[in-house]
Image (cartoon, rainbow, N blue to C red):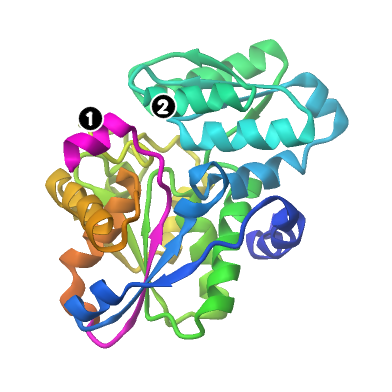
Amino acid sequence: MNILQEIVKAELRIRPYILKTPLFHSQYLSVETHSNVYLKLESEQYTGSFKIRGATNKVLSFTEEEKRQGIITASTGNHGQALAMALQVMGAKGIVFVPEHADPSKVDAIKRYGAAVEVYGKTALEAELYAKQRAQERGMVWVSPYNDPHIVAGQGTIGVELAEQLKAIDALFVTIGGGGLMSGIGTYMRSVSPHTQMVGCFPENAAEMYESITTGKVVESANKETISDGSAGGVEAGSITYDMCKEVVDEFVLVSEDEIKQAIRLLVDTHHKIIEGAAGVAVASYLRHKDHYQGKNVVILICGANIATEKLKAIL
């Protein structure tokens, strides 16, 4: 499948089911960093994150027979919510496997959209590999959170919107977990704005794609706990996102847990925006490298807003 062509198709296919999210000019960050800083607010998207784009594109690709078989996926929360909502809209049923540490508020949201939830494993990758096996055993359809061209293409529709909203983007900061978001946006931006610097952002405690790319092969690392639960988890061997991220990412930035928390507080204080840990990673990554982009047009992707109230209270 040609991902670029699929992104263009996905933009038309999913448009009735998603929101065109705002590109918000941050006066505070622009003045403080001597740049023109914009926030792409996927935090305002249905289900509170960008994930509804890829999930909707995937569900719209199903045949009637596949819908009857039932759908299985794995998620730390955001993808699970998105797929559950997309299935609800399309009148199909699904099961979402979550790891033991999954945020209870995200698990509750998955259930509210009508999907069944099963718990397995201590890590996102353990839950993912087990769910994939169970799908095969039960004769159900497996949907990867990232290793799927329809998922990647759906996420890439953010690039279509950005190209319409801001003609000159010098740098784009995107948090990477399994890599579907960066693969989709990066592929589209390479075609329409090849000069744009694509910056991959990671929490230091969970940077498996970074470690895989820098070592030259997919590795499984001993990830530590991170507030960026939306990007935590591994990359399965053979994932299409591994090669795509290698191709489109120009620079990698890793940030500490304290930097992520400071970024979350910053957006609450300056813009009254609640963002989740994975979005804080992208903001913190820009702040760490802000001196490189003075006078430039910078976009920070605010990938989601799904943070548990108790976790947010502790940070604040």
Q: Residue furthest bottom?
A: 295
Residue 199: x %, y % from top left: 33, 65
Magenta residues span: 294-316
Q: Around disc 1, counting alpha carbons within 10 Å, would you say few (fewer than 14), some (14 to 19), or many (20 or more)?
A: few
Left or right of 204? Residue 109 is: right
Q: Could one spot residue 69 in this view of the protein?
A: yes
Residue at 41%, 40% in the rendered image: 306
Q: Quadrant of the C terminus?
A: top left
Residue 7: x %, y % from top left: 66, 61
Residue at 49%, 45% in the rendered image: 48
Image-quadrant location for residue 290: bottom left
Say which of marks 1 and 2 sits in front.
2
Looking at the rendered structure, the secondary structure element under dot 2 is helix
Amino acid found under the numbered disc labelled 1? Ala
Residue 87: x %, y % from top left: 70, 32
Q: Quadrant of the N terminus?
A: bottom right
Q: Is residue 114 above or below residue 303?
A: above
Residue 164: x %, y % from top left: 59, 77
Q: Is residue 180 magenta?
A: no
Left or right of 92? Residue 283 is: left
Q: Is residue 303 magenta?
A: yes
Please name the residue that numbered disc 1 is placed on: 222
